[in-house]
């Protein structure tokens, strides 16, 4: 088969890591298909270094009018048997058979203007457009890939007609281990990895840190590792209002080595999200022997069992107590938890993800 991959998000977090790992695995073991990857000019050389990949450069942005009009014209220049869109933003005028990956339904579940920099009327229009594009992707796809049974359940609740097309393929951790053990000036610290959108619930994590530190002479910090943007500025203002800004450290768009080093040096990962499709930082933390404190939402229970320290993400005291449990762990208990984390982590691999995804391509074509 000649398979097209929409790789325009190649260098982004989340979806970008998904794309990068699929391509790497395909090149490693798939010798029967040819891949045309539509990507940013910056990624062309990297993708062309794979033996079965041909990169096609494009500056067409996702979520744009150009995506709807010009991207299908670009795709039509190639004789593709199937296209994999690794994100819901499928052009309405695409004429090729396609498979789509839906990573989560956060935008449906948390459709508030607070999650946008747009004025509320424009945001409402954008949200209507989002639902329309999502519905097109779901109903016109040959198969729908989701990263967990929790996302599958969410989809079926809203669109029960598509149940037979949905296939679950778990993702995996893939962050290379840093060879540096150099200390940070802001130790001791807890770590959060990801963006700062409102559903990530970081305001409650900040308030929990303040409560956790309230009777401590040696204050802990919270490092937020992710893209600095409008939402992080809101968090900075929030932390300042609550007089905890000196304990909140922002680390912008780190490379893999720098991120790995944070996992290795932190007291624990704090992941207070209200909605996720998979929660990749938890697996990365497991791989690094980092204790995890996370929301007691369904998807984390499905994937990570009883191993993390769970908390109620809407309860400040609950989050603070999980921080306290982590900070008071003795060496034997910590060793036991790390062993359990590694056992869970070993069940996930990108090779498994890629192999199952290829089967879904074949199924879609049949």
Image (cartoon, helix red, strand yellow):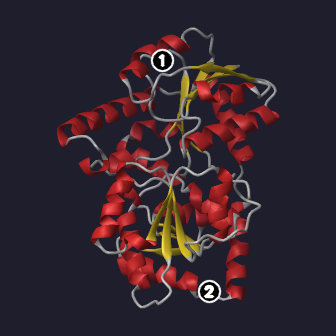
- Asked where in the image residue 17 lies, by quadrant, the reply is top right
Left or right position of 92 against 127: right
* Residue 13: percent from left, percent from top: 55, 45
Which one is nearer the viewer's eye here, 107 or 303? Answer: 107
Mark 2, residue position: 329
- Specify the farthest residue to the top: 77
Mark 2: secondary structure: loop
Which image quarter is the C terminus in?
A: top right
Which one is nearer the viewer's eye here, 139 or 38? Answer: 38
Q: Which mark is residue 219?
A: none
Cα distance between the residues tagged 1 and 2 = 53 Å
Query: Does label 1 or label 2 sit earlier along the sequence?
Result: 1
- Asked where in the image residue 55 lies, by quadrant, the reply is top right
Mark 1, residue position: 71
For the residues labelled 1 and 2, say whether their Cβ atoms are less than 8 Å apart: no
Which one is nearer the viewer's eye here, 23 or 346? Answer: 23
- Image point 45% across, 65% down: which residue? 297
- Image point 46% across, 89% down: which residue? 216
């Amino acid at each position: 088969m000649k398979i097209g991959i929409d790789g325009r998000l190649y260098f982004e977090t989340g979806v970008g890591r998904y794309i990068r790992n699929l391509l790497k695995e395909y090149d490693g073991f798939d010798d029967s298909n040819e891949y045309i990857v539509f990507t940013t000019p910056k990624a062309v050389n990297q993708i062309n270094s794979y033996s079965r990949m041909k990169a096609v450069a494009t500056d067409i942005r996702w979520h744009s009018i150009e995506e709807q009009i010009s991207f299908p014209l670009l795709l039509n220049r190639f004789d593709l048997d199937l296209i994999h869109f690794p994100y819901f933003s499928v052009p309405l005028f695409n004429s090729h058979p396609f498979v789509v990956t839906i990573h989560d339904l956060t935008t449906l579940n948390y459709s508030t203007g607070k999650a946008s920099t747009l004025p509320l009327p424009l945001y409402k229009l954008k949200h209507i457009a989002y639902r329309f594009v999502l519905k097109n992707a779901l109903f016109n796809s040959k198969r729908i890939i989701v990263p967990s049974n929790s996302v599958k359940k969410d989809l079926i609740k809203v669109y029960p007609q598509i149940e037979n097309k949905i296939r679950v393929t778990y993702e995996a951790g893939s962050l290379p281990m840093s060879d540096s053990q150099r200390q940070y000036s802001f130790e001791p610290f807890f770590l959060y990895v990801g963006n700062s959108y409102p559903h990530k619930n970081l305001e409650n994590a900040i308030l929990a840190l303040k409560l956790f530190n309230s009777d401590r002479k040696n204050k802990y910090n919270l490092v937020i590792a992710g893209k600095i943007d409008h939402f992080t500025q809101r968090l900075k203002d929030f932390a300042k209002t609550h007089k905890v800004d000196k304990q909140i450290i922002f680390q912008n768009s780190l490379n893999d080595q720098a991120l790995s080093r944070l996992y290795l040096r932190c007291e624990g990962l704090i992941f207070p999200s209200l909605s996720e499709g998979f929660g990749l930082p938890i697996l990365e933390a497991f791989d690094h022997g980092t204790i995890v404190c996370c929301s007691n939402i369904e998807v984390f229970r499905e994937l990570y069992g009883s191993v993390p320290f769970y908390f109620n993400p809407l309860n400040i005291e609950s989050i603070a107590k999980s921080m306290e449990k982590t900070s008071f762990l003795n060496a034997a208990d910590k060793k036991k938890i790390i062993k359990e984390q590694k056992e869970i982590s070993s069940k996930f691999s990108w090779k498994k993800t890629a192999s199952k995804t290829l089967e879904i391509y074949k199924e879609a074509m049949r």
